[in-house]
Amino acid sequence: MKKVMNSNFHVSNEHGLPYMELNPHFQFTDQRTGWLHTAGRSRLYLFDAHVEDWTNIRDIDHTISPRVGLVMDTLEKIKDRESIYGMVAVIDEIEVDEHYRNKGHGTEFLKEMEATLDFMYVNYIALVPASPGSEYQTDSSTIHYFLEQCYQLYAGSIGSVPVVGKSL
């Protein structure tokens, strides 16, 4: 089975702050039939966190997506303590088609995205670890999965939506 990660991207410059939207797709070719299958897709955003003042980032992140805003809220609070700098990738959504879940494809997709982002000199990656099919709902097995992948768990306050992230 030959596996590839394809992506399209969009560069925007709202409020004078450039950011990039990436939409990677995890695909593989069935050796038997030669057909190309899409096993998963994602949407993520790249921000330049070199700026001293995150005000410009904060002006646009909530307009992109509530999840992106939530992640950036958390990262802004911990950026000095966790040395978050340079290019930051925020995964807005990652989805593995139901037929391909629990077979290691999601982990492979995440690893491919991390390797690609590292190649692009992205320094940090973060997301809301939501369970499949859920906007914000997280169960302990989903959090445990990301901890096994060397992500750190961050929570704003008791009862708040957790965020996970790691340096690349």
Image (spheres, grey):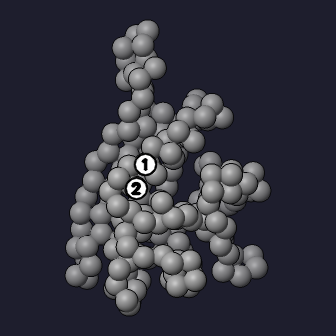
Measuring from the top left, give residue 120's x and y in whole percent: 32, 57
Q: Are marks 1 and 2 in contact (CB under 8 Å)?
A: yes
> Real-space Cα distance between discs 1 and 2?
5 Å
Q: Amino acid at mark 1?
A: Ala
Kindly tell me whether residue 92 is visible in this rendering: no
Q: Which of these two is toward me, 3 or 98?
A: 3
Q: Which of these two is toward me, 87 or 95?
A: 87
- Residue 59, picture quadrant: bottom left
Residue at the location (58% across, 29% down)?
99
According to the picture, the residue beneath numbered tag 1 turns out to be 115
Q: Which of these two is toward me, 63 or 12?
A: 12
Residue at the location (40% across, 86% down)?
54
Measuring from the top left, give residue 47's x and y in whole percent: 36, 71
According to the picture, the residue beneath numbered tag 2 turns out to be 118
Residue at the location (53% across, 39% down)?
108
Residue at the location (38% across, 49% down)?
116
Kindly tell me whether residue 71 is visible in this rendering: yes
Measuring from the top left, give residue 69's x and y in whole percent: 48, 75
Image label count = 2
Answer above or below: position of 15 versus 28: below
Answer above or below: position of 67 versus 114: below
Measuring from the top left, give residue 143's x and y in whole percent: 70, 57
Label 1 residue SS: helix
- Residue 30, picture quadrant: top left
Q: Amino acid at mark 2?
A: Asp
Q: Residues within 10 Å of mark 1 (few under 14, many from 20)?
A: some
Label of residue 91 in the image? none
